[in-house]
Image: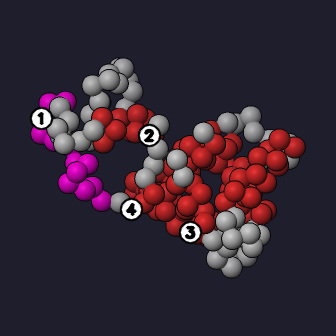
Amino acid sequence: MLKYALLAGAMTIAAPALAQSTTTSPQTAPTATTGAADPSMSPAQTAPGQMPPTQSAPGQSAQTAQATQPASSDQVAQVIDTEFPTYDKNGDGKLSTAEFGDWMVALKTKTDPATKPGAPETKKWVAAAFAQADTDKNKSLSKPELTSFLSQG
């Protein structure tokens, strides 16, 4: 659950930047039909602007519905590539515990504004996440480690 919250926060932060720099692929292009999704797409892959049949609440956009779906490894990697330099303060290509903590607190704050960076429970949460993500136990996180950690289901 924590990973989904982190991933949702990362996507929230990166969505405006990604929306400006990505092109529409044929799979996600809106179809000419009136409200019907491509039959080969699952409800989670409904084309933008179209609501899956199970989510027809007025005023709810397809983007909001898709934001609740887990992101693919490629999407996670794309967000990490975009945001990593922002948090890698010393530019060494790795995140220290403090750099990782800054990023995770920023992500958690997006999904839970009541998060307090200096609170003991937040520090404990960051330390546990770092320990789990640091698979080679070298006290720093590489992009592949971070991508693997955030892509786990």
Mark 2 and mark 4: span between their CA atoms? 22 Å
Circles 2 and 4: CB atoms closer than 8 Å: no
Q: Amino acid at mark 1?
A: Thr
Q: Is disc 3 surrounded by few (<14), some (14 to 19) or many (20+) residues within 10 Å?
A: few
Q: Is residue 80 visible?
A: yes
Q: Is disc 2 surrounded by few (<14), some (14 to 19) or many (20+) residues within 10 Å?
A: few
Nearest to N terminus: mark 1 or mark 3:
1
Q: Whole-percent x and y of residue 67?
A: 45, 40
Q: Where is mark 4, residue-wise?
A: 21
Magenta span: predominant SS is: loop
Task: Residue at 63% x, 71% y: name it.
Answer: 142
Q: Amino acid at mark 4?
A: Ser
Mark 1 and mark 3: span between their CA atoms? 41 Å
Q: Provide the residue span drawn in magenta.
A: 23-35
Q: Where is mark 1, residue-wise?
A: 33
Mark 3 and mark 2: span between their CA atoms? 22 Å
Q: Is disc 4 surrounded by few (<14), some (14 to 19) or many (20+) residues within 10 Å?
A: few
132 displayed left or right of 55: right
Residue 73 image-quadrant placement: bottom left
Nearest to N terminus: mark 1 or mark 2:
1
Q: Nearer the viewer, residue 6 or 109?
A: 6
Q: Is residue 49 visible?
A: no
150 displayed left or right of 98: left
Q: Amino acid at mark 3?
A: Pro
Q: Which callout, 1 or 3, points to the residue nearer the camera?
A: 3
Q: Nearer the viewer, residue 13 or 74?
A: 74
Nearest to N terminus: mark 3 or mark 4:
4
